[in-house]
Image: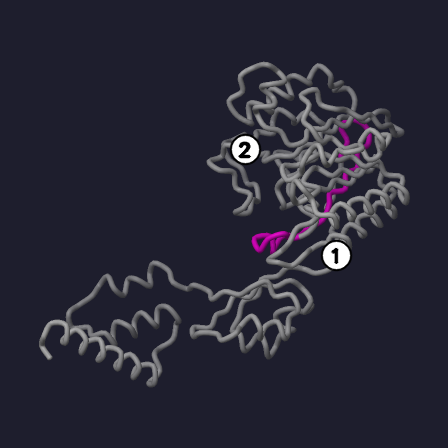
Amino acid sequence: MKILHTSDWHIGRNLAGFSLIEDQRYVLGQLKDYVKKQNIDVLIVAGDVYDRGIPTTESIRLLDDVLFEMISETSAKVLIIAGNHDNAARLAFGNRLYQNNPYIAGEFDVNLPKITLCDEYGEVNFFFLPHFVPERVAQQLRVKVTGVDEAFKLIIEHNRPRIDETKRNVLIAHGFFSCFLGGKSDLIVTEHELPVGGMDVIDVAPAAFFDYVALGHLHSPQKVYSDNICYAGSLLKYSLSEADQEKGVVEVFLEQKGTLETKMVTLPPLHDLKVITGFINDILEHPDVYCLDRSDYIFVKLLDTESVFDGIYRLRQVFKNVLGLGLLNNVSEEVFEVTRDLSESQDLLELFAGFFAKLTGKSLTQEQSEIVKRVAECGQSLADCEEGRI
């Protein structure tokens, strides 16, 4: 069975004020073409289909178009779960009319919904675990639950008797899953994905017996604990912290019991997201050195030490989609060592010259030195006036 594992479509997302709806339409069209060309049997969407609980009209239309084309033009079974960005009830609207294609698991059910598909090796059971909170688990099992990690263990324990481990089983889940074995995790996590105080982290080990675990929530594609537990990551780069990540989907080859192969498949975006660094004049004079495709989304980090007038406007004359700019802060702790070893013999010009050199790596020019001297003289005159000396 050939499975394509995707997640975190975030349809309707904006990036620094830029609508990504056409970027999403483009990459989802590539996804459909790949499913069709490679004769994929099952397409998984592991949560966060929409970017918000109440999606925009154009977001709903795009998902409707994508699902219609996927089902009418390919032979793939489409399996979807709700993520924390989705409104579970809205996402699963009309699910009973679809005749299980697509099958959408919206609301959490402690008795994990299951669909069984067959290939030449027999049955493959797909279990659905959409985004859940401990309170729902406690309510349905009528037990006390102290956190999301304990809730996940209880869910797996509750469903274990229903799972025939002699057959192939796939779990589709959405959440912040990690591996606690050895007390260390090497997950790739961006700042906005960090769980507050670690309270939302779930040990994935109880689900390790599944033949494959298709995860959603983290935007970087990666394996957790073993080769059979994977995050597919988001289809597109949705923040500056993801600029260096390679996006795509995971293709899973599930043959006889105990045999599994996975590979990452990249889907080139309509516009890439890049962070470029340099002096504004260099960037404007030699833009192709910094960005080969000028229609990409870019954020500019400037090395200039002096004020940059109307930088965004000037950059947008060359680059169509400038998200923003910032002056690199080269200040580090060692910069302030200049002020820690003060001696009474040092005057303001010496102190400032040392600070300037540490900050910029350059010496004051003659003109800059004269400006500092004049400022120092004005300051001294003001101090003398306040103390009544003049």
**Quick check: 189 left or right of 291?**
left
**Quick check: 190 left or right of 209?**
left
Q: Return the residue at label 1.
A: 22
Q: How many marks?
A: 2
Q: Quadrant of the N terminus?
A: top right
Residue density around tag 2, few if under 14, some if 14–19, many if 20 or more, within 10 Å: some
Residue density around tag 1, few if under 14, some if 14–19, many if 20 or more, within 10 Å: few
- Front-most of 128 and 364? 128
Residue shown at the point (85%, 44%) measured from the top left: 70
Marks 2 and 1, how far apart at CA: 34 Å
Height in image: 360 above or below 84? below
- Tag 2's secondary structure? strand
- Where is residue 348, by image quadrant? bottom left
Residue shown at the point (73%, 19%) measured from the top left: 163
Q: At label 1, which amino acid type do we have?
A: Glu
**Segment tinted magenta in the rendering:** 237-260
Q: Return the residue at label 2.
A: 201
Specify whether residue 255 is painted magenta. Answer: yes
- Front-most of 215 and 142? 142
Residue shown at the point (55%, 43%) measured from the top left: 193
